[in-house]
Image (cartoon, rainbow, N blue to C red):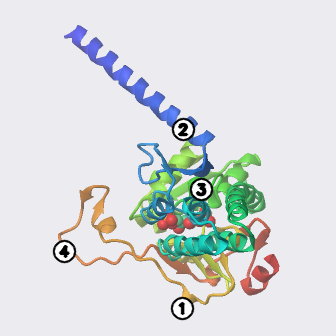
C-alpha cells in the first residue's frame, strides 16, 4: 500500500511539474510575441478563443481568413482589430494579380468591404481600413502601392504599443498607492498589439512604484475577463481577483473597490462611450457609490462624426448565451438577446485617458482639444 502511495505521489508530482513547465513555456512565448504581427508576408496572431488553456498561433495569407478571424473573435479588442484589418488589406495587396493601379484599388475596395462587415461597433476597424486605403490611393504603381501599404500596416502595429505606453503614463497619475481598481472585459495586451489600454494604465501605475490590486469581472458571455484579463494580470504578478459580473454591486457596496478603468470600442465627440456589454451597469453602480469611473482609449477609438443613433450595436449568436464553452446551460429554443456592446453616457464618466492626455467633463470641449 505504502509503495503504491509513493508511486502515485511521484506520478502526481511529475504531472504537476510537466503542466507547470508547459504553462510557463506558454507564458514565455506570449511575452516575446505580439497579439498580432506581420511576419514573412503573412499575418500571425494568437487564437484568443483558446486562451487561457491553449496558446496557439495561427498564420494567415488570405484576407478572407483575417476577416473570419475577426468575426469569430480569434482576434478581438478594438485596437487589435484595427491593426488586423490593416494587415488584411496588406495581404489583399499580395493576393491581387493586378498589373494596373485601378485594378488593384478595385480588389482592395472589395477586400475592405469584406473586412469592414465583420464587426460593426468598434470604430478602430474602419479607422485602420480607411488609413490603408488613403495610402493605397496615393501610390502611382502597383509595386509602390504594395510596398507602402505593407509598410504603413507594420508601422500602425508598432505605433499601437507606443501609444498604449503614453496612455499608461498619463493614466497612472489618476491612481494612488493601495488603490483597488475594477476593470471589465479585456482592454489589455490581447486587445491591442501589446501593453494594453485600461490594463496598460494599470501596468504603468504598478511600474511607477504604486501598489495596486485589481478586480476583474468575468464578462459573460464570452468571458474575456476571466479568460484574458485574469490571465494577463496574473502573469504580470499583479494582484487580481476574479468576480462574477453579478458581484459588481456587492464589491462596490462593501468598499472592495475604489476606482474603475475600462477600455472602449467607440467614443463620440460628446463623450458617449461604447464598450463591452455590462460597462453601463458598472458605470451606473459606480455613480451610485461615488467611485471614479475612467475610460482608457487611443485617439483612433474616437468617432467625431456620429451621433448615438448612428452607432450599430453588434448582436451576437444565441449559443454564446445558451451555453458556457461547449456545455449547454439553457433550454432548447429559448429566445435570446445578446448585444455585444452598450453605451455609457458622459455623465457617468470621470475622465477619458488617451495618449494625448486625460479629457475631463465637459467632454465636448475637452475631447475637441485632444484633436
Ligand atoms: C472588446 C471590448 C474591449 C475594448 C477595449 O470587445 O469591449 O473593452 O475593445 O478596447 P470584444 P481598448 O472582445 O467583443 O472585441 O483596448 O481600445 O480599450
Report the Cα–Cα distance between label 3 and label 4: 35 Å
Of the residues under marks 4 and 1, which one precedes in the sequence? Answer: 1
Q: Which residue is mark 2?
A: 27
Coordinates of residue 11 in the picture (x, y in percent): 32, 19
In percent of width and height, residue 221 lies at 38, 65
Q: Is residue 75 visible?
A: yes
**Callout 2: helix, strand or loop?**
helix
Ligand 1 quarter of the rendering: bottom right
Q: Quadrant of the N terminus?
A: top left
Residue at point 52% right, 57% down? 216
Residue closest to the far top = 3
Comes first in the chain, label 1 or label 2: 2
User: Mark 4 to mark 1: distance in Å?
Assistant: 31 Å
The quadrant of the image that shows the C terminus is bottom right
Give the x, y percent position of residue 114: 49, 72
- Mark 2 residue's CB less than 8 Å from ligand 1: no
Q: Which residue is mark 4?
A: 333
Would you place residue 176 above or below residue 71 in this image? above
Label 1 CA crowd tier, 10 Å (few <14, some 14–19, many 20+):
few
Going from N to C along the chain, the mark reached first, 4 or 2, is 2
Circle 3 sits on which residue?
188
Graded by Cα atoms within 10 Å as few (under 14), some (14 to 19) or many (20 or more), the crowding at tag 2 reads some
**Residue contact at pointers 4 and 1, CB within 8 angstroms:** no
Residue 290 in view (yes/no): no
Residue that label 1 marks = 309
Mark 3 or mark 1, which is nearer the start of the sequence? 3
* Mark 3 sits near ligand 1, with its Cβ under 8 Å away: yes
Query: Which element is circle 4 on?
Result: loop
- Across the whole image, how many numbered discs are drawn on residues? 4
Amino acid at each position: 500500500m505504502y509503495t503504491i502511495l509513493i508511486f502515485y505521489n511521484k506520478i502526481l508530482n511529475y504531472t504537476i511539474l510537466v503542466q507547470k513547465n508547459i504553462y510557463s513555456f506558454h507564458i514565455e512565448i506570449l511575452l516575446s510575441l505580439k497579439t498580432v504581427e506581420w511576419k514573412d508576408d503573412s499575418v500571425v496572431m494568437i487564437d484568443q478563443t483558446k486562451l487561457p488553456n491553449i496558446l496557439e498561433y495561427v498564420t494567415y495569407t488570405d484576407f478572407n481568413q483575417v476577416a473570419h478571424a475577426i468575426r469569430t473573435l480569434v482576434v478581438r479588442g478594438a485596437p487589435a482589430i484595427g491593426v488586423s484589418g490593416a494587415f488584411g488589406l496588406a495581404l489583399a495587396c499580395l493576393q491581387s494579380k493586378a498589373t494596373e493601379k485601378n485594378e488593384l484599388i478595385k480588389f482592395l475596395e472589395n477586400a475592405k468591404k469584406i473586412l469592414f462587415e465583420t464587426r460593426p461597433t468598434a470604430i478602430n476597424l474602419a479607422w485602420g481600413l480607411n488609413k490603408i486605403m488613403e495610402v493605397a490611393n496615393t501610390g502611382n504603381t502597383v509595386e509602390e502601392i504594395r510596398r507602402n501599404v505593407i509598410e504603413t500596416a507594420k508601422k500602425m502595429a508598432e505605433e499601437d504599443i507606443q501609444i498604449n505606453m503614453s496612455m499608461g503614463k498619463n493614466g497612472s497619475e489618476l491612481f494612488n498607492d493601495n488603490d483597488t481598481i475594477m476593470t471589465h472585459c479585456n482592454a489589455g495586451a490581447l486587445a491591442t498589439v501589446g501593453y494594453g489600454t485600461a490594463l496598460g494604465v494599470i501596468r504603468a501605475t504598478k511600474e511607477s512604484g504604486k501598489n495596486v490590486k485589481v478586480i476583474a469581472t468575468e464578462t459573460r458571455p464570452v468571458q474575456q475577463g476571466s479568460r484574458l484579463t485574469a490571465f494577463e494580470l496574473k502573469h504580470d504578478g499583479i494582484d487580481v481577483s476574479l468576480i462574477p459580473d453579478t458581484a459588481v454591486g456587492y464589491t462596490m457596496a462593501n468598499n472592495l473597490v475604489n476606482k474603475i478603468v475600462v477600455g472602449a470600442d467607440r467614443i463620440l465627440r460628446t463623450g458617449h462611450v461604447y464598450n463591452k456589454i455590462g460597462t453601463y451597469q458598472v458605470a451606473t453602480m459606480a455613480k451610485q457609490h461615488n467611485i471614479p469611473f475612467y475610460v482608457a482609449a487611443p485617439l483612433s477609438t474616437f468617432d467625431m462624426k456620429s451621433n448615438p443613433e448612428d452607432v450599430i450595436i453588434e448582436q451576437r449568436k444565441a449559443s454564446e448565451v445558451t451555453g458556457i464553452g461547449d456545455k449547454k446551460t439553457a433550454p432548447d429554443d429559448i429566445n435570446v438577446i445578446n448585444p455585444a456592446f452598450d453605451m455609457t453616457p458622459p455623465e457617468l464618466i470621470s475622465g477619458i485617458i488617451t495618449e494625448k492626455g486625460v479629457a475631463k467633463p465637459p467632454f465636448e470641449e475637452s475631447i475637441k482639444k485632444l484633436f
